[in-house]
Amino acid sequence: MEPPESSAAERTILRWDTTASEDAREKMIFSGDRLEIDRYLDAVDELQKSMSSATLSDSSSSGSGASSSTLQIAMARLEDEFRNILLSHTSPIEAELLLTESTQSELSSQEFEMNEEIAESSSFDRQFEHQESNTSTTSSCYKSTTSIREVDLISCDAVYDLRCIAERMIAAGYLRECIQVYASVRKSAVDASLKKLNVEKLSIGDIQRLEWETLETKIRRWIRAAKICVRVLFASERRLCEQIFEGLGNSADDSCFMETIKGPAIQLFNFAEAISISRRSPEKLFKILDLHDALSDLLPDIEAVFESKSSESIRVQAGEILSRLAEAARGILSEFENAVLREPSKIPVPGGTIHPLTRYVMNYISLISDYKQTLIELIVSKPSTGPRYSSDPNVPDMDFSEYEGQASTLALHLIWIIVILQFNLDGKSKHYKDASLAHFFMMNNVHYIVQKIKGSPELREMIGDDYLKRLTGKFRFSATNYQRATWVRVLYCLRDEGLHVSGSFSSGVSKSALRERFKAFNAMFDEVHRTQAMWLIPDTQLREELRISISELLIPAYRSFLGRFRSHIESGRHPENYIKYSVEDLENAVLDFFEGFPVSQHSRRRSE
């Protein structure tokens, strides 16, 4: 015969048997009176105790079977109660709980395109963007561990009840059932939170098929979501598992955590993995570096949240993704260098202005300098340059030994990119039929390179003043070559040689030779004026400086020539046919140079 206590315990348990009582099906024990909750838990304890005693004594098999059946009813009931408590206290994590000082400061400094994001984000995202004025009500929910901010996902009373149930289910051998119920409910909540954070369920193949412009937006969102997921969401789920299951045997808290989080964590990190193994191209570098920096920053927190043996796969995956992102960045930089060297366009840009390649490359390396801290760590090998390292004569040669100890490896790559850009531009300049325009083109482009370096303190620091001086020298060399190619032949018309006649009773000047000299000067200057008005210097200061330099060459020489020989022409017939320009006319004509449109338009402008 069963002891009275066991019979009372069984009666309490059977009274809440949902298969035998309509009232038991409609009501939940843990939604009611605390005394009833404790009475039921005590009954389960008594039943388990009596069954344990019966196992040690020589009890009848019929009594043991009845108790076992009652225990199964109790476990089924506790499983339902466990599920109900979880469901009634589970919802996607609230936006205000996601808002922490650390994540807010990171967003303000790193998500520089967030204004665009806010416009298209959900109300949840907009909530997340605004700092709550009163955080004192939530501060008790956080446990500071580096950047991790754990929040209370379920109230303390509900956690207590869940642990009470878990203790009894696990003691009775129902660990698997308990974990399955917990993980199914909590995983749904985590999935809902991920959805609010715009973390989509996409396979690696799905991600790789998306257009890069679409992925850029998704990368920005992913970086923000990943910080919240690791530091708030996953960390808080881990703490909840510990609060309910820690110390209940068989690493129940770890098992429960991984059952809940593994799928969402894989979903989250699959995105970064897909980007890390996607096809490489130069436009992807900076978003890949953003991803790398974000994941690198998160790695200590990932290791803290997923520290157990059972979650080692998540830690390993994150580390491997970080390595692949680093390798992708190195590969893209190398491919960018090759693309600059091999850029094949052969059609000369009109007017010898700045080539689109020059703008693209210099804007690109200016952005590289913004990521110098990361890239200095990632770029560890020097560029391979020229015939010494390759059999290809179409690669420029450069000795970097003089920069060793003075410049980082990254800086050497930036200098190398500029070297191969100039090498390519030199090749493109040869497609101009006019030697003056070829020099003019190089002057324009090297000047642009110099100005871009000077305009970026980070880039200038890495390139260094020594190489900048070399570039400035190259610019001046091209400017000098342009002036020689254009103006030496024009000024040659203003020489005295060949104009004087010896042994004659005349004035000593050959008027016919002088007329031919003026006609030659007029023709040459007309041609230069007509042609070079169409050439373009976009930089206002350079345009003005080159005009001044031309005037300093041309105007004094013409003024002197005109002063010496004007009378000889004016004393003859039709002097206007030979003296076409006054000094003032030439000064005005030089102002038409390098504007990029025809002389006729300049004339109209001056007359208006």
Image (cartoon, helix red, strand yellow):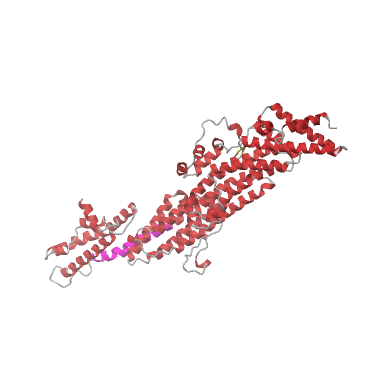
Q: In this view, does 470 lie to the left or right of 230?
A: left
Name above or below for residue 599 compared with residue 54.
Answer: below
Question: Magenta: predominant secondary structure element?
Answer: helix
Q: Residue furthest right?
A: 58
Name above or below for residue 289 compared with residue 509.
Answer: above
Q: On the image, which quarter does residue 426 sit in? A: bottom left
**483 within the magenta span:** yes
Asked whether the viewer can see residue 323, the reply is yes
The front one of 312 and 463 is 312
Name above or below for residue 325 compared with residue 347.
Answer: above
Residue at position x 14%, y 72% from top? 504
Q: Is residue 32 left or right of residue 439?
A: right
The front one of 301 and 191 is 191
The front one of 446 and 12 is 12
Stretch in magenta: 470-494
Residue at position x 81%, y 29% from top? 5
Asked whether the viewer can see residue 379, the reply is no
Percent position (x, y) of residue 441? 36, 61
Q: In this view, does 135 lie to the left or right of 252?
A: left
Q: Is residue 146 left or right of residue 474?
A: right
**6 within the magenta span:** no
Percent position (x, y) of residue 297? 57, 46
Q: How many numbered discs?
A: 0
Percent position (x, y) of residue 180? 68, 43
Percent position (x, y) of residue 500? 19, 69
The quarter of the picture where the N terminus appears is top right
The front one of 592 and 129 is 129
